[in-house]
């Protein structure tokens, strides 16, 4: 139950990041979230959309795992995607912003721990 809830939260976080990067990158909200200028946001819009697509795949993988059932076929998918999220978050925290550690890595690590503990 806890693992299912945490996996759902991580999926929602990544769905939101997908929206920010693909649809809201150049908006005031997107620029404020990522700390970009209007000029940088306009110049990097396509790159951000590509990044957003990858975040969408992570969200989709977690939703797929939940639909398949984390006690059944979805367990391996959930472990794999949560590990990918955690590693991507570590890389992002090391190269872009420490905030990514708290927004992405910590929730994924908690969900993965709950999943592995089967709680």
Image (spheres, rainbow, N blue to C red):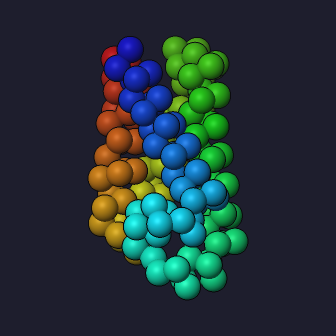
Q: How many marks?
A: 0
x then y, percent, for residue 103: 35, 51
Q: At 52% from the left edge and 14% from the top edge, which residue is drawn? A: 71
In which quarter of the view is residue 90 placed? Answer: bottom left
x then y, percent, for residue 30: 49, 63
In which quarter of the view is residue 46 placed? Answer: bottom right
x then y, percent, for residue 89: 42, 57
Please give left or right for residue 111 compared with residue 76 in the image. left
Relative to 67, does residue 111 appear above or below in the rendering? Answer: below
Q: Quadrant of the C terminus?
A: top left
Q: At 32% from the left edge and 57% from the top edge, which residue is drawn? A: 101
Residue that sits furthest to the front in the current view? 28
Please give left or right for residue 53 compared with residue 114 in the image. right
Q: At 57% from the left edge and 59% from the top edge, which residue is drawn? A: 24
Q: Quadrant of the N terminus?
A: top left
Q: Nearer the viewer, residue 60 or 12?
A: 12
Q: Which of 64 and 84 is in front in this view?
A: 64
Q: At 57% from the left edge and 33% from the top edge, which residue is drawn? A: 62
Relative to 67, does residue 20 appear above or below in the rendering? Answer: below
């Amino acid at each position: 139950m806890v693992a299912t809830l945490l996996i759902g939260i991580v999926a929602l976080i990544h769905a939101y990041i997908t929206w920010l990067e693909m649809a809201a990158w150049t908006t005031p909200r997107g620029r404020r979230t990522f700390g970009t200028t209007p000029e940088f946001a306009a110049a990097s819009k396509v790159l951000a959309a590509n990044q957003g697509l990858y975040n969408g795949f992570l969200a989709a993988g977690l939703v797929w795992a939940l639909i398949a059932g984390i006690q059944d076929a979805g367990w391996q998918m959930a472990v794999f995607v949560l590990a990918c999220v955690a590693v991507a978050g570590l890389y992002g925290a090391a190269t872009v912003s420490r905030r990514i550690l708290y927004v992405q890595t910590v929730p994924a690590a908690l969900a993965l721990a709950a999943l592995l503990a089967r709680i």
